[in-house]
Image (cartoon, rainbow, N blue to C red):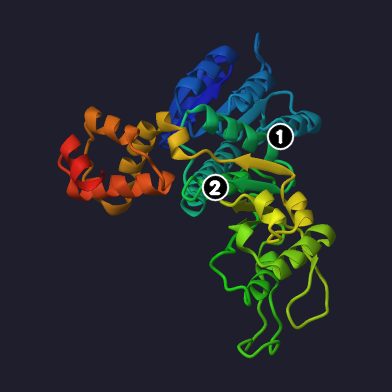
């Protein structure tokens, strides 16, 4: 494990360095704040010990700079002028802990273990979130940059979001990103595909039911709204929901209460609703298939996801991403795709959008040569 010690006193730096090296840590030092920030920017450390009282950039300024730069390494502040107010102030500004001088060996080692344990836990949580919620949004086109900006602004709020776009364009990924970047990220994220649930079961699925409320209700069932309490409920294909279910969803959004099928008891829920559709809901309203009042409740913010044909510049990036992802998941040997073959894929019309592109990349990994050639594209894709 790699540790950085920041202190303007050489004796303190060297003695702390010796102690930690005897415990098996790899240690680097910095004699001032500016040097520390440059090292933390270039290299990755498992923990940073930083003195507060230093000439030039003091320890508090180093801490604030590291936090502002997005450095996630735990920072442990040390000072010979320790007091409660200083310690509290450092913790508020993002420090992991505060240790007073003279330094106590046991306190140093315990604090360091706790800091590295927390760093490992944060890393594992990120890995698990990627597995559960999916990967980051790939692309640098204007449309994708606009969506990222929208997500950053909207995610911290509780506003209802309606995501529109063609099948396979990535609406689910936008919904997951909204949840991950929200204050509800540690609470449940529950998905419901409204098109996949029969109309006679949608109410039971969303709001739950009591035992015996209908023939097959052999036990009490909590609906998706209850399961998502405190978190986010993603209603995919909302345009396929029955009018009866729409009326009940509207009531939940207005009153924040549900009642299970077969019960007249109200249950309070705290849920952020994100919905998605590939339909033109304005046209569905005109046809009488969708409630206008529900539409206005769901569409406080509208995010339109562009089709793949509208963001062709992203196709080479997506191809490389899917090559890495599929090979990692399936242990298949990685293949390259020739520049000419990539150009041919860029020119293709992608009616199935991102989902179709991923399927094509997997097909080429299985059937194509190495590198994948134009002939492979002609034989297996076009």
Res. 145 image quadrant:
top right
Res. 213 image quadrant:
bottom right
Task: Classify 266 as above or below 141.
Answer: below
Q: Which residue is mark 1?
A: 91
Q: Which residue is mark 2?
A: 171
Left or right: 312 as drawn, with respect to 95: left
Mark 1–mark 2 Cα distance, whole angstroms, equals 38 Å
Left or right: 378 as drawn, with respect to 40: left
Task: Classify 251 as above or below 283.
Answer: below
Q: Earlier in the sequence, mark 1 or mark 2?
A: 1
What percent of the width, then of the height, locates residue 255?
84, 61
What percent of the width, then of the height, locates residue 253?
78, 58
SS assignment at label 2 = helix
Q: Residue at x 63, y 91 (%)?
A: 215
Q: Residue furthest front?
A: 287
What percent of the width, then of the height, locates residue 355?
41, 49
Left or right: 52 as drawn, with respect to 32: right
Q: Which of the pair 329/318 is nearer the observer?
A: 318
């Amino acid at each position: 494990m790699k540790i950085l010690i920041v202190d303007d006193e050489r004796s303190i730096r060297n003695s702390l360095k010796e102690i930690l090296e005897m415990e098996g840590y790899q240690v680097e030092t910095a004699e001032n704040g500016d040097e520390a920030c440059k090292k933390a920017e270039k290299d990755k450390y498992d923990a940073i010990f930083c003195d507060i009282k230093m000439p030039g950039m003091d320890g508090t300024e180093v801490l604030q700079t590291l936090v502002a730069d997005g450095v996630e390494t735990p920072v442990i502040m040390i000072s010979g002028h320790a007091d409660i107010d200083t310690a509290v102030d450092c913790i508020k500004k993002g420090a992991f802990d505060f240790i007073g001088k003279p330094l106590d060996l046991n306190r140093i080692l315990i604090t360091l273990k706790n800091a590295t344990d927390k760093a490992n836990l944060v890393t594992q949580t990120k890995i698990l979130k990627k597995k559960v919620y999916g990967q980051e949004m790939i692309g640098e086109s204007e449309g994708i940059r606009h969506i990222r900006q929208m997500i950053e602004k909207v995610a911290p709020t509780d506003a209802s979001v309606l995501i529109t776009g063609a099948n396979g364009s990535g609406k689910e990924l936008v919904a997951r990103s909204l949840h991950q970047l929200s204050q509800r990220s540690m609470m449940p994220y529950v998905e419901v595909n409204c098109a996949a649930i029969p109309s006679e079961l949608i109410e039971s699925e969303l709001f739950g039911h009591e035992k015996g409320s209908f023939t097959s209700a052999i036990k009490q069932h909590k609906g998706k709204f209850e399961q998502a309490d405190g978190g986010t409920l993603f209603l995919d294909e909302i345009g396929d929901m029955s009018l009866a279910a729409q009326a009940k969803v509207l009531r939940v959004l207005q009153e924040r209460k549900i009642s299970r099928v077969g019960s007249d008891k109200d249950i309070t829920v705290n849920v952020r609703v994100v919905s998605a559709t590939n339909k033109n809901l304005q046209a569905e309203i005109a046809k009488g298939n969708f409630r206008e009042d529900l539409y206005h409740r769901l569409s406080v913010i509208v995010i339109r996801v562009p089709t793949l044909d509208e963001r062709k510049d992203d196709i080479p990036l997506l191809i490389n991403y899917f090559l890495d992802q599929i090979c990692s998941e399936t242990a298949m040997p990685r293949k390259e795709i020739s520049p000419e073959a990539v150009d041919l894929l860029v020119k293709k019309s992608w009616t199935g959008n991102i989902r179709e592109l991923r399927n094509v990349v997997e097909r080429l990994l299985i059937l194509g040569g190495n590198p994948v050639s134009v002939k492979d594209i002609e034989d297996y894709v076009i």
